[in-house]
Amino acid sequence: MTHYEVIIIGAGPAGMSAANILKDEKRVLIVDEYYHYGGRLLGQLYEESKGSWWNGMDVAKHLHDVLDEKITLQLETSVYNVEKEDTEFTVFTNKGDFTSDYLIVATGAKENSYPLPGWELPGVMTVGAAQVLTNFHRVAPGDAGVIIGINPLSMVIGMELGYADIEVRKICLPAENKFNTTTPKDALLTLMGLGRSAPTKLLSIPAVIGSRMSPFHGMALKLFPSKGIKALGLPLSIKERVIKINGRDSVESVTTVKTNSDGSVIEGSEQEIKCDFVCISDGLSPVNEITSLFNLKHAYLESLGGYVPIHSEQMETEVDKLYVAGNITGIENAKVAMLQGEMAAHHISGNEAAVKNTLKSITDERKNAKVKFHKNLDAGRDKLQLYWLAK
């Protein structure tokens, strides 16, 4: 059984950033179940500011290229169990078992999706799958698609599909049921939140409509066009729901209904939108199975995307020498994940000055983030720290 000083589970932005800090002083192993490094960086492509682009593939390549031969990177390696006995961790994988003194869990996030009639048809996928197909594999998911779900992830990926000249015929809400209770008001508030720091006009136009009058009085919803708006070629409708996906052997169309401002369906408003692929988007949630193996305390915080392991600002957990970093700690952007990976590594190294500087960088990045995936992120982080102090 091979021993390492540090094992990192996850070769995404957090995991590789941690490894780059540790590579000169620790013997490090990174394992990842995917065949390519990068995690959720793969496929990311958006304009941060005019003329400045964030290319996730380039970022991932840079993080990988500076690892050099000091780091052992093992891809296509699935972790099925982790144990700790005394001061040593044992990581069980499909390619052998490994031990370490420290463990960093940087397993990232998974996409949420919801059922609706026809969702089993070929051509139905999550928005993240469409993103990776398009920007990483350079394969179009189809010629014309419909995106179901209005949230930061669906909006950003809708833009990315447009960059690749893939037609998006509609971005709208899912049918309301026990799985989905999103209302037009919820969608408008999401768009307004994006618009406050929108990286493109697409995200700022809906905010202009709603920001000058309180949505709680219903005026913003009433003024939002029932046919939706079209910005940069992307049609967006918060008063329209997809009730089913149609097709014989693959996706051929979707059926939608119009709604009133309160979300109630307008009778007789059904219409069919022709398309050959459908993207379902219900946001992201932390991948926490590994930390659950240690019976760590987890807290459900909607503002962070779901259940997250209770941890300190330095990425420590209740288990000595076990750290977490990246989207397992709450859904945020890749820059925050990279800094969290660095934070865990600096804490392992005992570099107090670097810990202090990195904490400031994380705070600054959160303050300046262009897109926040959930409302009340700061309040969620504050509550998490209270849980940590009370542990």
Image (cartoon, rainbow, N blue to C red):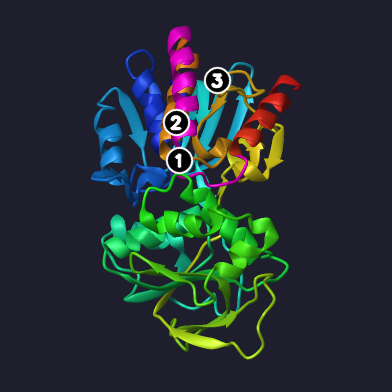
- Dot 3 or dot 2: first in sequence order is 3
| Label 1: few (<14), some (14–19) or many (≥20) C-alpha neighbours in 10 Å | many
- Residue 355 belongs to magenta span: yes
Is label 3 in a helix, a strand or a loop? loop
- Residue 64 belongs to magenta span: no
Q: Residue 214 location, x and y as percent?
A: 63, 54
Q: Amino acid at mark 3?
A: Gln
Q: Nearer the viewer, residue 193 or 249?
A: 193
Q: Nearer the viewer, mark 3 or mark 2?
A: 2
Q: Is residue 155 left or right of residue 64?
A: right
Q: Which quadrant does the C terminus fall into?
A: top right
Residue of label 3: 314
Q: Amino acid at mark 1?
A: Asn
Question: Which quadrant would residue 48 be assigned to in this image?
Answer: top left
Q: Residue 166 location, x and y as percent?
A: 30, 70
Is label 2 in a helix, a strand or a loop? helix
Residue of label 1: 333
Q: Amino acid at mark 2?
A: Glu
Q: Which residue range is magenta in the image?
A: 352-376
Check if mark 1's residue and mark 3's residue have beta carbons within 8 Å: no
Question: Which quadrant would residue 11 be assigned to in this image?
Answer: top left
Q: CA distance from mark 2 to mark 1?
A: 9 Å
Q: Is residue 30 visible?
A: no
Q: Nearer the viewer, residue 282 or 205?
A: 205
Q: Nearer the viewer, residue 29 or 248?
A: 248
Name the dominant secondary structure of the magenta segment. helix
Residue of label 2: 365
